[in-house]
Image (spheres, helix red, strand yellow):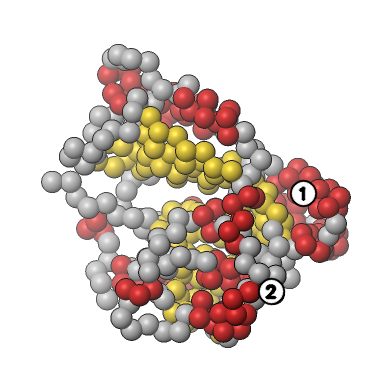
Amino acid sequence: MTPPRTQQIPVVVLAGFLGSGKTTLLNHLLHNRAGTRIGVIVNDFGSIEIDAMTVAGQVGSTVSLGSGCLCCAVDASELDTFLETLTRPSARLDVIVIEASGLAEPQELVRMLLASENPHIRYGGLVKVVDAAEFDGVRERHPELDRHLAVADLVVLNKTDRVGEAERERLRAVVAELSRPAAVISAAYGRIDPELLFDPELRPDGEEKIRQLTFEDLLREEAGEEGRDGHGDHDGHLHAAYESVDFTSDVPLDPRRFIAFLDSRPEGLYRIKGFVDFGAGDRDNRYALHAVGRFLRFVPQPWARDEPRLTQLVLIGSGIDAGALSEGLAACRAEPGPDAPDAERAMWGVLRYVQQEPDPEDVPAEV
């Protein structure tokens, strides 16, 4: 019997200078989480105001946000401790967002996550929020902004409603050049599609018989049906900021070709998620693929009995050529009849990126 698969929780780092709109974006994610339970970690000694609740300078504290969402205020040195707490099954979280303080070095948080020995997390990307209206002034005062953009996986050019079209295009071009090959998304009021960062769980709040007042409730009370900024609900149009490509193949992929495709993935391609069948390269396992910006990991998982052997992938990005990506993936299909030894040797490129799935016996017990 195949053992149950342990889900790794994506950890997203949300960074940006003071006033760029990080908290507004975080509010938006909480408001549009579609049942997803979000853990929020506040880095350093900064403060975060989430509507009616404020956490300020409370190092080592954990506050419930309702509907299973949690907020922790921590010093960077305690990050691993709180990740251990938030990844316990009893927390029932689906994604963790670390909001870096306005003057933090986000690459240090990324290094800590990549070096973490916690088997129950995976890196979910560095999202850098940029204030379009203040970009030039912030860049002049804080030249390290260029360095931060250079390591971002996704850049949100926020507050674009405060600049004209020509200025918006100029800023987008400058930011894209500094952050290459990251995807750049334009936004107002921090409104980006949550699917860029995590997969909504679509878990209805009604399944909880007794629950706290949620942030959706608070937002509805404050803003009514028009939305908190008074501009109506435009969330249905968020998908216009990016493109997605779906790919399914009942023919296994050639490991060498697919790794070459991934190594040359184009600018603006932010996420790749799904499962890959490498056929004779490994007949026992399918490979879960998690790619965020420059970060790439495969996790081998045993095929379930009678499970259809398919490659199923979703690619998400901004400014990408969907047709070219589909053609590139189709060209990765294996030629018919490869012999097993050659296929196994071809898997060496994949093994560079393999991360073993956590052992279910290592999962902490419910507390």
Q: Nearer the viewer, residue 194 or 238?
A: 238
Q: Residues within 10 Å of mark 2 (few under 14, many from 20)?
A: few
Q: Is residue 106 visible?
A: no
Residue 53, by quadrant, is bottom right
Disc 2/disc 1 C-alpha distance (Å): 24 Å
Query: How many numbered markers are drawn?
Result: 2
Q: Which of label 2 and label 1 is nearer to you?
A: 2
Report x, y in % for residue 285: 27, 36
Residue 219, by quadrant, is bottom right
Please tell me which residue is depicted at 54% across the width and 82% down the height of the picture. 218
Report x, y in % for residue 290: 45, 45
Give the side of residue 246 with respect to residue 223, left or right. Answer: left
Give the side of residue 49 with respect to residue 313, left or right. Answer: right
Please tell me which residue is depicted at 46% across the width and 69% down the height of the picture. 39
Report x, y in % for residue 291: 49, 43
Quarter containing the C terminus: bottom left
Relative to 349, is 193 above or below? below
Give the side of residue 47 with respect to residue 17, left or right. Answer: left
Label for residue 337? none
Report x, y in % for residue 116: 44, 57
Q: Nearer the viewer, residue 16 or 196?
A: 196
Residue 176, by quadrant, is top right
Give the side of residue 306 with respect to residue 286, left or right. Answer: left
The residue to which callout 1 is attached is 172
Q: Secondary structure at mark 2?
A: loop
Label for residue 229? 2
Return the disc, 2 or 1, that comes first in the chain's sequence: 1
Amino acid type, label 2 = Asp
Q: Is residue 259 visible?
A: yes
Relative to 226, is 240 above or below? above
Relative to 56, is 181 above or below? above
Q: Secondary structure at mark 1?
A: helix
